[in-house]
């Protein structure tokens, strides 16, 4: 959400990554990733249905976040 207004964008399926790859790009453990999501520090695109509900991320967003952390 952006100031209370929902925004949308087109994301190619080739740009979608899971928690494992996201954690690797950020150089953190998957459990740390889950804690950062719960704390609102990292925003997944969505969470899949099902009992374990895998998170899905936009590679571009995560790469930008990783670059920002490196600075």
Image (tube, rainbow, N blue to C red):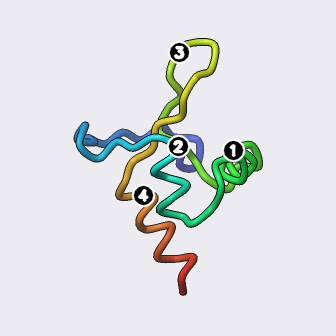
The kind of secondary structure element at disc 1 is helix
Q: Which mark is residue 19?
A: 2
Q: Position of residue 7 (x, y in %)?
A: 42, 41
Precedes in sequence: disc 4 or disc 3: 3
User: Could you say whether the residue bearing mark 4 is in a helix, strand or loop?
Assistant: helix
Dot 1 or dot 2: first in sequence order is 2
- Do the residues bearing badges 1 and 2 touch, measured as CB atoms within 8 Å? yes
Q: Name the residue that disc number 4 marks.
A: 61
Q: Which residue is mark 3?
A: 49
Question: At which x and y percent is residue 38?
Answer: 74, 43
Q: Are marks 4 and 3 in contact (CB under 8 Å)?
A: no
Q: Nearer the viewer, mark 2 or mark 3?
A: 2
Task: Name which of mark 4 and mark 2 comes first in the sequence.
Answer: 2
In the rendered view of the protein, which quadrant contains the N terminus?
top right
Label 3 sits on a secondary structure element that is: loop
Q: CA distance from mark 3 to mark 1?
A: 17 Å
Q: Residue at x 28, y 42 (%)?
A: 11
Labels in figure, total? 4
Judge from the rendering whether residue 2 lies leftward or rightward of residue 37; answer left or right.
Answer: left
Tell which tag, 4 or 1, sits nearer the viewer: 1
Alpha-carbon span between mark 4 and mark 1: 16 Å
Crowding at dot 2, Cα within 10 Å, few <14 / some 14-19 / many 20+, comes out as some
Give the mark nearer the N terminus: 3 vs 1: 1
């Amino acid at each position: 959400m952006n100031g209370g207004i929902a925004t949308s964008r087109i994301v190619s399926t080739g740009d979608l990554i899971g928690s494992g790859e996201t954690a690797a790009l950020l150089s953190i453990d998957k459990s740390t990733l889950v804690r950062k999501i719960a704390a609102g520090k990292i925003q997944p695109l969505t969470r899949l249905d099902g009992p374990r509900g895998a998170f899905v991320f936009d590679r571009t967003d995560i790469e930008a976040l990783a670059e920002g952390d490196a600075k």
